Amino acid sequence: MTAPSFPGIMNMTPLKWPDSFVPPPPEPPRTPGAQSWLRMLWDLFLLRLPMWYPGYDTVVPYIEEQLLARGPSDPSRWGDDPLRVRIGQLACKLIQKEYDWPSDNFLPDDPLDVVLRFPWDDLEWVKTAMRLSTELSIGTHDAMRIAREATTLGDMVDMLAAHVQRQSGKP
């Protein structure tokens, strides 16, 4: 499946961080022997709190402004494949609700790290993946893996759609 191209959507640019913001690099996997589990959880908690990582108070409103400038959501951006449209709309609604975004008007080209605020909101993306897995009747670990491997919202939707099709036995 490929992302559709629509003239009205081409005028909208994908969400982006402010130019002054440099997101932190993804945390490398840690081994339990390197630190105690309690210390790992504490580090993760402190590093992901908005007050401990600079930029949250300016970055989130910047992204909200971009979303509000887009106007109403348009399901046709997800193409004409009914499964892709359904998953795209579902993902947008769940993300808006979980992250309290002012709109569900996300584009397939929106980067997932921006949409899911990866520098800060680890638990929200897990909850979003769990809700997607429930709604799509797929494994939670599969939904979480897909959300972590995808780079854009459209990639995630395509990967979820392919997984649902494989699971149902349809080509």
Image: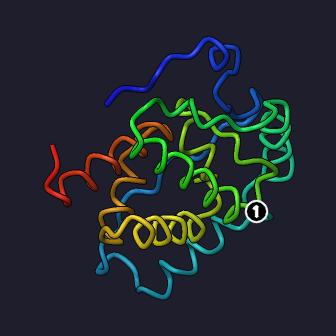
Q: How are the colours assigned in the image?
A: rainbow
Residue 75 location (% of width, % of height)? 60, 37
Nearer to us in this view, 124 or 135: 135
The residue sitting at 80% across, 33% down in the picture is: 66
| 102 is higher (above) or lower (below) than 30 | above
**Kind of residue sitting beneath label 1:** Pro
Question: In the rendered image, which residue does mark 1 sit on?
Answer: 50
Q: In which image quadrant can residue 49 be found?
A: bottom right
Q: Would residue 79 be found to the left or right of residue 96 on screen?
A: left
Q: In which image quadrant can residue 157 be found?
A: top left
Q: How many marks?
A: 1
Nearer to us in this view, 80 or 72: 80
Q: Would residue 25 be found to the left or right of residue 73 on screen?
A: left
Residue 57 location (% of width, % of height)? 86, 52
Q: Would residue 47 be found to the left or right of residue 160 on screen?
A: right
| 36 is higher (above) or lower (below) than 63 | below
